């Protein structure tokens, strides 16, 4: 799962499964590229007594989720899954008013209530947003390409998620969901940009170049 950094107008990201539900807001010139809020799933489960099991990374994060301590779950996921958040301004924070996750123009990241269905998914969402923050820090938000620049930023982030899916211990269904999201954005790219992606190139040239 684009306000952009990264740049000028505010970009708030909402990633959805199907292209028809992609919420891209319009600015004065007709398009405001953004990282949309990621809708990763259902709200977190109700707090329970606790989790019995080995002190694995999953168990550590799940214990915080079950206790309803979502900020602690985020912090534990970052630590337990060794997520690089150096490009994030501050640290990812829990926001109950957000359903998915958002990377804001100032480089901060908020994690909402809908991403706590499993420790691996929570870690993947955090890593996805941290990847967007790195794109922002690298000045690699392609606003001049409007929608196409937005799509290719998402394709790159999901490609990274898929490449590292097994490291995060994702289930087959969770990996299939990542692939669907990747395919959704890839299919929205123009053929010439798909050719870039097929070569592992995610840096787009200015529109007036061949």
Image: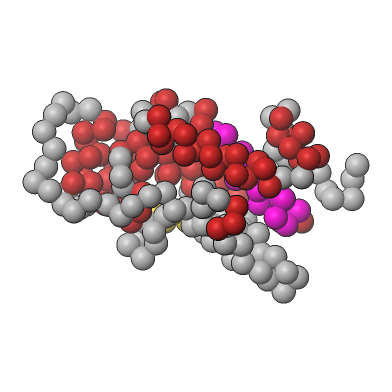
Q: Nearer the viewer, residue 6 or 143?
A: 143
Q: Residue furthest left?
A: 49
Q: Position of residue 137 (x, y in %)?
A: 60, 48
Question: Which residue is pictured at 55% across the width and 50% down the height?
Answer: 18
Q: Nearer the viewer, residue 176 or 46?
A: 176
Seen in the image, is 10 located left or right of residue 70?
right
Residue 85 seen: no
Seen in the image, is 133 located left or right of residue 117?
right
Q: Is residue 50 above or below residue 29?
A: above
Residue stretch rendered in magenta on the structure: 145-160
Q: Position of residue 175 (x, y in %)?
A: 45, 33
15 part of magenta stretch: no
Q: Is residue 52 above or below residue 190?
A: above
Question: Which residue is pictured at 37% across the width and 56% down the height?
Answer: 112
Marks counted in the figure total: 0
Q: Position of residue 139 (x, y in %)?
A: 67, 49
Q: Main secondary structure of the magenta part?
A: helix
Tell me which corner region of the image, top left, top right, bottom left or bottom right, holds residue 173: top left
Q: Nearer the viewer, residue 99 or 130?
A: 99
Q: Residue furthest bottom?
A: 28
159 part of magenta stretch: yes
Question: Which residue is pictured at 89% across the width and 45% down the height?
Answer: 209
Quadrant for the C terminus in the image: top right
Seen in the image, is 205 located left or right of residue 61?
right
Residue 186 seen: yes
Q: Position of residue 111 (x, y in %)?
A: 39, 54
Colour option used: secondary structure
Seen in the image, is 159 located left or right of residue 39?
right
Question: Which residue is pictured at 41% across the width and 36% down the height?
Answer: 174
């Amino acid at each position: 799962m684009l306000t952009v950094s990264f740049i000028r107008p505010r970009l708030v990201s909402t990633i959805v499964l199907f292209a028809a539900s992609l919420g891209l807001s319009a600015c004065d010139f007709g398009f405001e590229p953004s990282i949309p809020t990621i809708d990763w799933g259902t709200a977190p489960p109700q707090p329970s007594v606790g989790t019995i099991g080995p002190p694995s990374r999953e168990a550590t994060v799940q214990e915080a989720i079950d206790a309803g301590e979502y900020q602690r779950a985020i912090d534990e996921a970052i630590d337990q899954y060794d997520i690089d958040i150096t490009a994030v301004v501050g640290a990812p924070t829990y926001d109950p008013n957000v359903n998915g996750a958002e990377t804001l123009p100032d480089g901060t990241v908020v994690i909402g209530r809908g991403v706590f269905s499993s420790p691996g998914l929570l870690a993947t969402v955090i890593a996805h947003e941290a990847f967007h923050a790195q794109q922002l820090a690298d000045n690699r938000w392609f606003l001049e390409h409007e929608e196409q620049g937005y799509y290719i930023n998402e394709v790159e982030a999901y490609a990274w998620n898929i490449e590292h899916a097994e490291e995060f211990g994702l289930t087959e269904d969770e990996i299939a969901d990542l692939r669907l999201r990747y395919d959704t954005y890839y299919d929205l790219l123009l053929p010439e940009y798909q050719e870039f992606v097929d070569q592992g190139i995610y840096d787009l040239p200015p529109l007036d170049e061949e």
